[in-house]
Structure formats: structure tokens, C-alpha cells
Amino acid sequence: MATTHLDTKTNRAYATGGRKTSVSRVWVRPGSGQITINGLPIDEYMDRPVLRMIVRQPLELTQQTDQVDVFATVRGGGKSGQAGALRHGISRALAILNPELRGPLKKEGYLTRDARMVERKKYGLHKARKRHQYSKR
């Protein structure tokens, strides 16, 4: 299956989103504004208000908050990475459902995959960059 496509039979758009090690699969269709993540309403799945705000950002930017339903599955990473992956997936799906929304979403940077990842730990160091404490004696 492609990372993005429009299903004309059911009139819903599909897209994948990513952030850190999280990957989201998002379906967006015209509806009443319900957001379901991994089978749970957004208020139950995302416990922090900041994370709910991040997920809703593309919908609020395009004034689609109460015009589309979002059904998503998300795996990997922590809640913050998952919220970013959902924002990316929702933005891509909205751009497919209505191509006129692509401009505002792109201008805000919601269609760009944030490539920042955790740096790996290096041999001989405490963490990725933290060194051992120097001992003079």
C-alpha cells in the first residue's frame, strides 16, 4: 500500500506520518470531528493537553475541526513522538482529501517529516557525547 492515497468509494484519505521512532497510519473522511487513536478517543489516549493540541493543529489551521473524522493507529516511541507522527499523518491526509489545503499546511511545516532522531551512544563514552570526568591525580 502507498504511503498516501484517496479511496473514492468510501471518500476517505489515507496517509502515514512519522516522528522520531513513531509511525502513524491515518484515515481522514468527512464527518463530525471525532478523532480516534488506536481505538480510543483522543482525550483518553493523549493524556496531556499539549499533546492533544499538537494532534489537532492541522485541523485547526485549516478550519476542519468539526468537518472531518480522523481514525488513526500509531506505534513506536513515546507519546510526544506519537503526537508528532499523528500531526504529520493528519496533515498529509488532509492535503490529499482537499488539495487546496496543501498550501497552508506546507507553509506551517506540517507536511515536512521532522528528521531529528536520538543520537546513538558511542563506545568509551557515558552517553552519546558525555565523556568521563578527567582525573588529574
Image: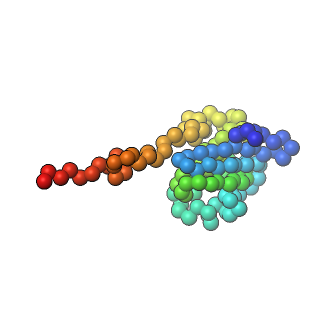
Which residue shows up at 64% across the image and 49% down it? 24
Q: Is residue 28 above or below residue 100?
A: below
Q: Is residue 22 visible?
A: yes
Percent position of residue 126, x then y? 34, 52
Query: Which residue of the protein is positioned furthest toward the right in this rendering?
Result: 9
What residue is rendered at 68% in x and 54% in y? 73
Task: Give percent across and percent down for residue 81.
Answer: 54, 52
Whether residue 56 is visible, yes or no, is no
Using the image as rendered, state which of residue 117 and residue 60 is in the foreground.
Answer: 117
Q: Residue drawn 64% across and 54% down?
A: 74
* Residue furthest out toward the left: 137
Q: How many marks?
A: 0
In this rendered view, identify the residue nearer to me: 7 or 31: 7
Name the residue at 58% across, 50% down: 22
User: From the viewer's perspective, is residue 53 above or below residue 45?
Assistant: above
Q: Tell me the colour scheme of the image.
A: rainbow
Q: Please provide percent x and percent y for residue 119.
A: 44, 45
Quadrant into which the N terminus falls: top right
The quadrant holding residue 61 is: top right
Spot occupied by residue 106 in the image (x, y as percentages of width and height): 59, 35
When the figure is inspected, residue 131 is found, relative to residue 47, above or below; the finding is: above
